[in-house]
């Protein structure tokens, strides 16, 4: 378990967002926490027009600690999981040396429809998993892999010690900034939100709620 877990206060207008307008039904709920080694743990659950459901998680490490970025997204259209992605993305230059071996040992062979990593996805590790989930068995396997990646993350965070070298800390900050900048290039995020909100609101939501660096 993560140590010193506590809630982060956030703008209430962005915590629960609901619309009951017929044909434009909308539900978004956000949770924000922090813990030892993590500056922000964000979980978003969203449903659009009763047919598109999204689960989005990003756990950003405190740059003082040598911990990767955990990211996981599920996109479900009606009863089909069209996109499922999970990764421990590097938050410094040589960080992957610490954990890529563990990730590579996780069995990811059971998926029949692996998806291509988008062009902006150079931020991900070599062991990112991106797939469509064709049946219940694949959904269960994806859940297993998420649990294993989280176990590796918790292990790394429990072993991490604070860093005081400003140059190393700045490198980790730069990696998180790059992660956010690249994620913002995912046009599908804004395309969905722009069906319900104006451009100014969408840009603010993406930059403050989803990817805040």
Image (tube, grey):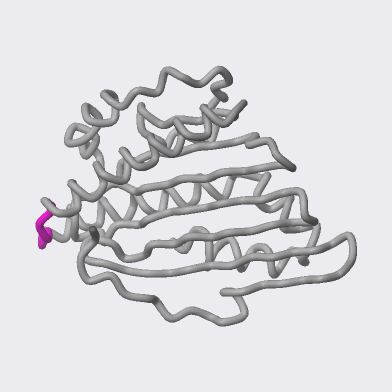
Point 48% across, 68% down: residue: 31
Residue found at the far right of this picture: 22
Pick the residue in front: 80 or 128. 80
Above or below for 11 versus 168: below
Task: State which quarter of the image contains the C terminus.
Answer: bottom left
Please say whether residue 137 is one of the residues in the magenta stretch. Answer: no
Total labels drawn? 0
Q: Is residue 116 left or right of residue 87?
A: right
Q: Is residue 84 left or right of residue 27?
A: left
Q: Is residue 200 left or right of residue 95?
A: right
Q: Position of residue 155 (x, y in %)?
A: 18, 47
Q: Main secondary structure of the magenta part?
A: loop
Pick the residue in front: 52 or 194. 52
Start-end of magenta stretch: 160-164
Residue found at the far front of this picture: 136
Point 32% across, 69% down: residue: 34
Task: State which quarter of the image contains the N terminus.
Answer: bottom left
Point 67% across, 50% down: residue: 53
Q: Position of residue 71 (x, y in %)?
A: 43, 47
Residue 107 appears in which quarter of the rendering?
top left
Residue 115 appears in which quarter of the rendering?
top right
Q: Position of residue 123 (x, y in %)?
A: 41, 38
């Amino acid at each position: 378990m993560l140590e010193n877990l506590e809630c982060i206060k956030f703008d209430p207008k962005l915590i629960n967002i609901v619309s009951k307008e017929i044909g434009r039904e909308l539900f978004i709920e956000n949770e924000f926490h922090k813990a030892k080694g993590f500056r922000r743990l964000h979980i978003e659950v969203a449903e659009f027009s009763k047919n598109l459901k999204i689960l989005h998680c990003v756990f950003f490490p405190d740059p003082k600690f040598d911990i990767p970025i955990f990211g996981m997204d599920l996109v479900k259209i009606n009863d089909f999981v069209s996109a499922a992605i999970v990764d421990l993305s590097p938050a410094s230059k040589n960080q992957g040396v610490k954990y890529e071996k563990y990730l590579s040992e996780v069995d990811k062979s059971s998926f029949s429809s692996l998806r291509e990593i988008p062009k902006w996805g150079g931020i991900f590790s070599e062991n990112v998993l991106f797939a469509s989930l064709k049946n219940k068995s694949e959904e269960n396997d994806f859940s297993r892999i998420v649990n294993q990646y989280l176990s590796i993350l918790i292990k790394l965070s429990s072993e991490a010690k604070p860093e005081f070298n400003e140059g190393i800390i700045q490198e980790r900050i730069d990696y998180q900034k790059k992660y956010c900048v690249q994620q913002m290039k995912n046009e599908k995020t804004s395309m969905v939100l722009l069906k319900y909100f104006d451009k100014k609101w969408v840009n603010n939501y993406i930059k403050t709620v989803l990817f805040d660096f």
